Image (cartoon, rainbow, N blue to C red):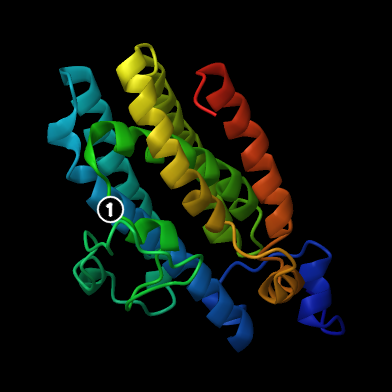
Amino acid sequence: MTDTMPIEDYLAQGGVLTSPANVPPRYRGELLRLMASFVDSELAGSAGFADTINDAPGIQERISAARIVLEKTDHAGQVLKVMESFGADGGRYAAHHPWAARLAREAEIGATRQGGDMRLSVFHYPLEGWVDAVVMNVLMGRAGTVQLKELSRVSYQPLAEVFRAILPRETRHAELGAAGLARIAADTEGRAKAKAAVAYWYPRVAESFGHSGSVRFTTLSRFGLRHTPNETLLAEWRAAVDAELSALDLN
């Protein structure tokens, strides 16, 4: 950044920041909000999925579920380290909220965040058994990869590097879920349960992309913290999961 170029212009033109020392206050606030949303969603997601490990029908499925729980928690820890450079207390963070807490299954909260943490709204809904957990993992896993591709371009370079390192593992989580869903959908009873779970989770995962025409997107894009509108990311997700579900007769 030059001494004469406003920081928003610098960031809008693809500039990056590399240290808390050169981050302006408004940018800092939005960056911390973005990181907290990711960390809280990973911790809440892993806590919810951990409860389903013993519902897995076989050893390989249990291994896959345990791996997902482990790596999501690790991903939260990697981003939390970046937050610590801004003064966050990483030592207390993991125990700061009841990550496994959920609302009633029939709750309708849209994209509104609940409680005292920053998890995406979808992580406030409870899982019900193995099939339900696999379907949610597939749908949210695909959403996560779409969103991480976007986050890998954030203008705060240390965070972008972390997101780029996380992306392949989160992609693998979605692939593990897809393999499990294919096995479930191979028989009539499993397919019927999976269709019911898709009907429940599909709109709730879609809400995680936020509102079309978001005012906050305009603010974030000026800071180089977002580049692609919510509706475009949602359309990309819909195209990917609709094709995947169609191939398994789960639309």
The residue furthest bottom is: 25
Residue shown at 71%/63% (left/top)? 212
Amino acid beneath label 1: Pro
Picture quadrant of residue 52: top left
Q: For mark 1, give the secondary structure.
A: loop
Q: Quadrant of the N terminus?
A: bottom right
Q: Is residue 103 visible?
A: yes
Residue shown at 26%/42% (left/top)? 69
**208 vs 50: above or below:** below
Q: Is residue 77 visible?
A: no
Q: Residue 247 at what x, y percent from top left?
A: 56, 17
Q: Residue 188 at what x, y percent from top left?
A: 35, 14
**159 vs 175: above or below:** below
Crowding at mark 1 (Cα within 10 Å: few <14, some 14-19, many 20+): some
**248 vs 167: above or below:** above
Residue highlighted by disc 1: 126
Name the side, left or right, on which 170 lies relative to 235. Answer: left
Q: Quadrant of the C terminus?
A: top right
Q: Total number of numbered labels?
A: 1
The residue furthest left is: 54
**Residue closest to the eye, 251 or 130:** 251
**38 vs 187: above or below:** below
Q: Residue 209 at what x, y percent from top left?
A: 59, 57
**Residue closest to the eye, 194 or 59:** 194
